[in-house]
Image (cartoon, rainbow, N blue to C red):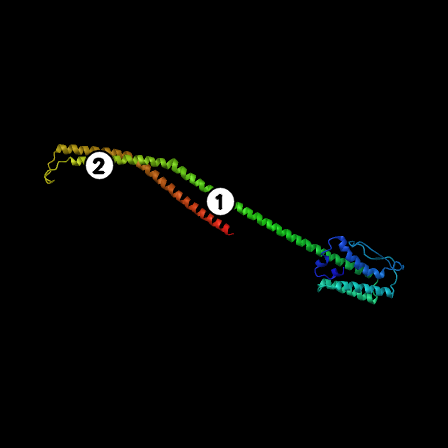
Amino acid sequence: MGNTLVSGTGFSSLRRLSSSEEASKPLQRAYSDAVRPLSLDGIGRIGYERKSFYDFSLPVLRPQKSAPATPSEKAGLAFAGVRSQSYSATGSRPASPSRTSVLSRVLSFVADLKKGKKGAAYIEEGHQLRLFYNRYLQWRFANARAEAVLFIQTAIVEKTLFNVWNATSSLWESVIRKRINLQQLMLELKLNSILNDQQMTYLDDWAILERDHVDSLSGAVEDLEASTLRLPLIGGATVLMVDIKVLKVAICQAVDIIKTMGSAICSLLSRVEGMNDLISEVAVVVAREKTMLDQCEVILASVATMQEMESIS
């Protein structure tokens, strides 16, 4: 118990006191050293009673008979106090203010014993004080050990939370990546459905109309060439000898051909207007497709950046 009275932190002296037996051994040795000069039961003057180490409600030492102390007994008390004080002073560090006050009280107690001012009740109080201080150091050790265990548990919990957060982040990134791929596939399917279901049919109709239009124009050109080549020219176009009837017939034929061309053009005009509307719709769809492709490009760029950051980290 001597080393536990003035210990700096209370850990080195109580490190091996995990069981009740190990905690009671140094206390019993100090107790026997302090009480040995006073155990005079065989003579019949003064006797003492041992109590439990953990029982603080009752005094540890209780006098059974009260008798005046002789000079030899006073000397024995002084010797016991000095001996316990010498045990507590060996291998100690500079004491804190609280331990300094306890030490001063013990020193004053020893001085009073030397002067013969203290009796058996004060001896009991001093021993009780030493027991309380030893118990205080044991509680400090228990609290420090509990704090160390709590610190380790806190570190383990923080590490577990970090691992959970990391796993959750990786799962969230995979979910975002799959959503982006799904949206891209949906846009591709929509574009293919638009092109295959509507626009390809319109383009096929446009090819048929274009072929009919080319045939009509080529026929009109051929008719005009034939009408102009039938005009008789004499004298190198200086003297025009034309038969009025032949010219009238040719002009009438040309007018008939033009009327036929006009009716054909009018019938094709409605189709051309419808095709114009379809082409405008195709242009709108192409513009939307371009904007969607730009958005997909931006999303893919951001995903590539996130993958690079993830690979770097």
What is the x, y in percent for residue 109?
Answer: 79, 64
Q: Amino acid at mark 2?
A: Val
Q: Secondary structure at mark 1?
A: helix
Q: Amino acid at mark 1?
A: Arg
Mark 2 or mark 1: which comes first in sequence?
A: 1
Residue 120 in view, yes or no: no
Dot 1, how many residues are within 10 Å of its Cα: few (below 14), some (14-19), or many (20+)?
Answer: some
Kindly report which numbered mark, 2 or 1, lies closer to the viewer in this rendering.
1
Which quadrant of the view contains residue 219?
top left
Q: Is residue 230 above or below residue 52?
A: above
Residue under the point 12% across and 33% down: 244
Q: Which mark is residue 129?
A: none
Residue 12 in view, yes or no: yes
Left/right placement of residue 292 relative to residue 113 reads: left
Alpha carbon separation for disc pair 2 and 1? 62 Å
Point out the image quarter for the N terminus.
bottom right
Q: Secondary structure at mark 2?
A: helix
Left/right placement of residue 276 relative to residue 152 reads: left
State the residue position of label 2: 221
What is the x, y in percent for residue 181?
Answer: 47, 43
Which quadrant of the view contains residue 207?
top left
Residue under the point 78% across and 56% down: 25
What is the x, y in percent for residue 35?
Answer: 83, 60
State the residue position of label 1: 177
Residue under the point 83% across and 63% down: 77
What is the x, y in percent for residue 166?
Answer: 55, 48
Q: Is residue 129 above or below residue 265?
A: below
